[in-house]
Amino acid sequence: MHATRIPTKLGTFTARFTEGGLAAIDFPERTKTNGRNSDPSETLIASAKVARWKRQTASALKRVLEGRRPGPLPPLDWSQGTEFQRRVWSALLDIAPGNTRSYSEIARIIGQPRSARAVGGACGANPIPVLVPCHRVLAAGGRLGGFSGGLDWKRRLLAREGAIRFTLAPG
DNA sequence: ACTGGGTAAACAG
DNA sequence: CTGTTTACCCAGT
């Protein structure tokens, strides 16, 4: 596992990689990590391949934060997900910036029209937010629904994409 | 605004 | 396997 920090206008994200690809993205931490030194063992593991993935991830992340399409992505390591979760996450990649789907629409798209609630669960388990755009999935009637990284992030990401005509959620 | 029933997946035990 | 917990949804109050 190799981690890298990605500074952006909205804070410093952290991306984690395995040999299989990008495995996770963490939102900026409130707590200021006294950053600086990197673990030397990680440096040894780093390969040209991973270095390329890091560049692609940083570029894609910044572009999505600007409301644009991500451009080329590194391979995504979804090996920790179940078959169902991978189907949901895969469907999320087809939602363009500025567009939204509802949980039940995603359920229908993957061929399980009664699994809207389970789709919510899979979105909550998405380890690669922003690039796998679970923030573009809303509840029925345009309500905001939930977001693991906090609803503020969901609102901010949607606003950046000009997709902010949903009713406000409690809270 | 609040409830209750229906529904499906993941997880703890 | 059984119970509990969900980023759900819809029809009734």
Image (cartoon, coloured by chain):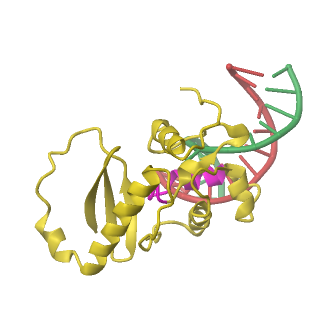
Chain colours: A yellow, B red, C green
Residue A105 lies within the magenta run? no
Q: Quadrant of residue A87?
A: bottom right
Residue at (53% x, 40% y) in the render: A159
Residue that appears at 34% across and 72% down: A53
Q: Nearer the viewer, residue A104 or A53?
A: A53
Task: Report if residue A121 lies within the magenta region.
Answer: yes
Q: Position of residue A152 (x, y in %)?
A: 46, 36
Q: Position of residue C9 (x, y in %)?
A: 75, 43
Q: Quadrant of the N terminus of chain A?
A: bottom left
A69 or A151, nearer to the observer: A69
Is residue A39 left or right of C4 when viewed as pictured?
A: left
| Magenta segment boundaries in residue numbering | A117-131
Q: Give the answer, above or below, for where A74 lies relative to A95.
A: below
Residue that appears at 61% across and 58% down: A95
Residue at left 19%, top 45%?
Answer: A33
Residue C9 higher or lower than A88, as above or below = above
Residue B2 vertical placement versus A28 (above, below): above
Left or right position of A168 against A39: right
- Left or right: A7, with A135 as reference point: left
Residue A86 point in image, percent of width and height: 56, 67
